[in-house]
């Protein structure tokens, strides 16, 4: 059940982001790194708006139109850091893929 709740929260959050920023509403022609930066920037701006505005009309409007359940949005993303375990795992996968590619070329 936690998975469904997390999915609902993620869908709701992307709905809020798309309602506010048009750049997220259509397929992007930017490369993947720029797309990641755009999404992170939109999330950080949303957190800033939530901290500075008592009432956010866009969020109120979206909340009224979405019925994905109650959500507590008091946790803010303060920073993004890499995890050495995941970095090592990613590097291992990259090495395996490269070695397999070299074996077939």
Image: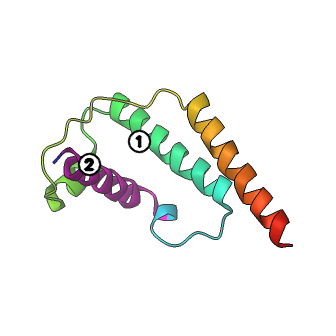
Which residue position holds label 1? 46
Q: Residue at x 16, y 56 (%)?
A: 68
Residue 53 percent location from the top left of the image: 32, 33
Q: Mark 2 to mark 1: distance in Å?
A: 15 Å
Q: Residue at x 13, y 50 (%)?
A: 69
63 within the magenta span: no
Residue 95 percent location from the top left of the image: 75, 50
Question: 99 above or below 25?
Answer: above
Left or right: residue 79 versus residue 12 is: right
Tell me the crowding category of disc 1: few under 14, some 14 to 19, or many 20 or more residues within 10 angstroms, Cα based. Answer: some
Q: Nearer the viewer, residue 96 or 39?
A: 96
- Quarter of image, res 48: top left
Q: Is residue 83 visible?
A: no
The magenta region covers: 2-22
15 within the magenta span: yes
Labels 2 and 1: the sequence-earlier one: 2
Which residue position holds label 2? 9
Q: Are marks 2 and 1 in contact (CB under 8 Å)?
A: no
Q: Nearer the viewer, residue 105 or 91?
A: 105
Q: Is residue 104 visible?
A: yes
Q: How is the image coloured?
A: rainbow
Q: Residue at x 14, y 56 (%)?
A: 64
| Magenta stretch: helix, strand or loop mostly | helix
Question: 23 above or below 51?
Answer: below
Left or right: residue 38 versus residue 57 is: right
- Quarter of image, res 61: bottom left
């Amino acid at each position: 059940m936690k998975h469904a709740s997390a999915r609902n929260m993620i869908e709701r959050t992307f709905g809020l982001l798309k309602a506010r920023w048009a750049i997220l509403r259509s397929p992007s022609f930017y490369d993947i790194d720029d797309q990641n930066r755009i999404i992170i920037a939109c999330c950080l701006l949303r957190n800033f708006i939530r901290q500075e505005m008592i009432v956010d009309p866009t969020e109120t409007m979206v909340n009224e139109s979405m019925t994905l359940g109650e959500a507590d949005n008091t946790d803010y993303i303060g920073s993004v850091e890499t995890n050495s375990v995941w970095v090592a795992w990613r590097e291992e996968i990259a090495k395996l893929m490269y070695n397999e590619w070299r074996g077939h070329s």
